[in-house]
C-alpha cells in the first residue's frame, strides 16, 4: 500500500454531465475524499464553482495534483484522462461506456502501471443480476436469451455497456444472447433479460431510478482503489 493524503484527492472527469454533477454533489458529503479538479470538454463560465476548480479538456495537463480520477465522460474524452493518470501515477475509476476495442486494450495495458477499475455499471443490483444471468444460462441450455435495455434519449451508445456485460455473463453460461435497445424520455437505465423455450419463459429485470446509485458506487470504489498497487480491478474486489 502506498502513502496517501487524507482526504484522498479526486479529479472528476465529465464533470458537467449527468453523472459528473451527481459525483460532485455526493463527493461533497464524504470526509475521506476531496475534489481537487473538475474537467469537462468545455470550460464553464466560472473557473471555481462551490470551491472546486474547473478545467476544459484542452487544459488537462495543467490540473492540480490528484490521487484518483473518476471518469464518466464519452469515448472521445477517455484517451486523455487515461494518459494523464499514467503520467501522474494516479488511479483511475471509469464508467464510460461505448469504448472502442483499442481503448479497452490501452486500459488493459495501463493496468500494469496504475490501479484501474472500469465497470459498465456501478450498482449492486446489476452485479447480482449478472450472477443470476450466468446461472440461468448455464441451467437452461438451448433456450433463447434476449437482452432488452432502455435508456434516456441522450444516451449515445447502444447496446448499453451493461447490456453487453450481461451478455458476456450469459455467454459464460453457454447462451447466445440477442440485444434490443430503446431510447425514450428520461429513463435512467433498465435491463431486462429473458430466457425462452417452448411453453415457458424466465424474466430477470433491473431498474435504476436514480443516478446516485452509480455515483455512490464509483466514489466508494475510488476511495479504495487509490491505495491499491497497479492492476485491473473488478467492482467486486473493492466492495468490502
Ligand atoms: N458505469 C456506470 O455505472 C454508468 C455509466 N454511464 C456512462 O457514463 C458516461 C457519461 O454519462 P452522462 O453523464 O449521462 O453523459 P453526459 O453527456 O451528461 O456528460 C458527458 C460529460 O463528458 C464530457 N465530455 C464530452 N466529451 C469530452 C472530451 N472529449 N473530453 C473531456 N470530457 C468530455 C462532457 O463535457 P461537456 O458538457 O463540456 O460536453 C460532459 O461533462 C456515458 O458513457 C454513460 O454511458 C452513465 C451512468 C452510469
Ligand atoms: O448512459 C447511461 O445513462 C447509463 N449507462 C451505463 C450503460 O451503458 O450501461 C449504465 C447505466 O445503465 C446508465
Image: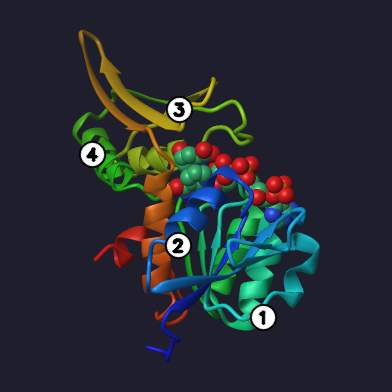
Q: Residue at x 31, y 42 (%)?
A: 130
Quarter of the figure with residue 238: bottom left
Q: Which residue is mark 1?
A: 87
The residue under label 3 is 149
Residue at point 59%, 26% (across, down)? 153
> Residue 223, position in %: x, y?
39, 71
Q: Earlier in the sequence, mark 4 or mark 1?
A: 1
Give residue 132's mark: 4
Q: Can residue 97 be seen at all in this image of the molecule?
A: no
User: In the shown orientation, is residue 162 left or right of residue 50?
Assistant: left
Distance between the Cα atoms at labels 2 and 4?
34 Å
Q: Within 8 Å of ligand 2, the CB of disc 3? A: yes
Q: Is 77 left or right of 72, judged from the image as shown?
A: right
The vertical placement of 127 against 71, above or below, is: above
Where residue 21 sits in the image (x, y, percent)? 55, 50
Where does label 2 land, which residue?
28
In the drawing, does residue 65 fall left or right of residue 168?
A: right
Looking at this view, name the residue that lies furthest to the top: 199
Amino acid at each position: 500500500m502506498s502513502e496517501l493524503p487524507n482526504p484522498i484527492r479526486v479529479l472528476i472527469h465529465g464533470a458537467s454531465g449527468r453523472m459528473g454533477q451527481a459525483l460532485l454533489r455526493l463527493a461533497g458529503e464524504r470526509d475521506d475524499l476531496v475534489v481537487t479538479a473538475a474537467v469537462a470538454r468545455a470550460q464553464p463560465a466560472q473557473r471555481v464553482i462551490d470551491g472546486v476548480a474547473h478545467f476544459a479538456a484542452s487544459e488537462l495537463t495543467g490540473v492540480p495534483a490528484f490521487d484518483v480520477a473518476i471518469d464518466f465522460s464519452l469515448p472521445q474524452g477517455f484517451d486523455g484522462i487515461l494518459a494523464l493518470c499514467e503520467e501522474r501515477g494516479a488511479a483511475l475509476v471509469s464508467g464510460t461506456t461505448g469504448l472502442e476495442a483499442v481503448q479497452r486494450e490501452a486500459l488493459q495495458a495501463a493496468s500494469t502501471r496504475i490501479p484501474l477499475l472500469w465497470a459498465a455499471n456501478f450498482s449492486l443490483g446489476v452485479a447480482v443480476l449478472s450472477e443470476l444471468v450466468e446461472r440461468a444460462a448455464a441451467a437452461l441450455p438451448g433456450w433463447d436469451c434476449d437482452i432488452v435495455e432502455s435508456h434516456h434519449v441522450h444516451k449515445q451508445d447502444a447496446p448499453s455497456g451493461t447490456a453487453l456485460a450481461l451478455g458476456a455473463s450469459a455467454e459464460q453460461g453457454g447462451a447466445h444472447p440477442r440485444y434490443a435497445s430503446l431510447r425514450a424520455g428520461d429513463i435512467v437505465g433498465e435491463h431486462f433479460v429473458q430466457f425462452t423455450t417452448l411453453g415457458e419463459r424466465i424474466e430477470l429485470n433491473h431498474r435504476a431510478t436514480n443516478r446516485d446509485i452509480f455515483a455512490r458506487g464509483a466514489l466508494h470504489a475510488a476511495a479504495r482503489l487509490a491505495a491499491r498497487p497497479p492492476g485491473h480491478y473488478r467492482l467486486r474486489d473493492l466492495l468490502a
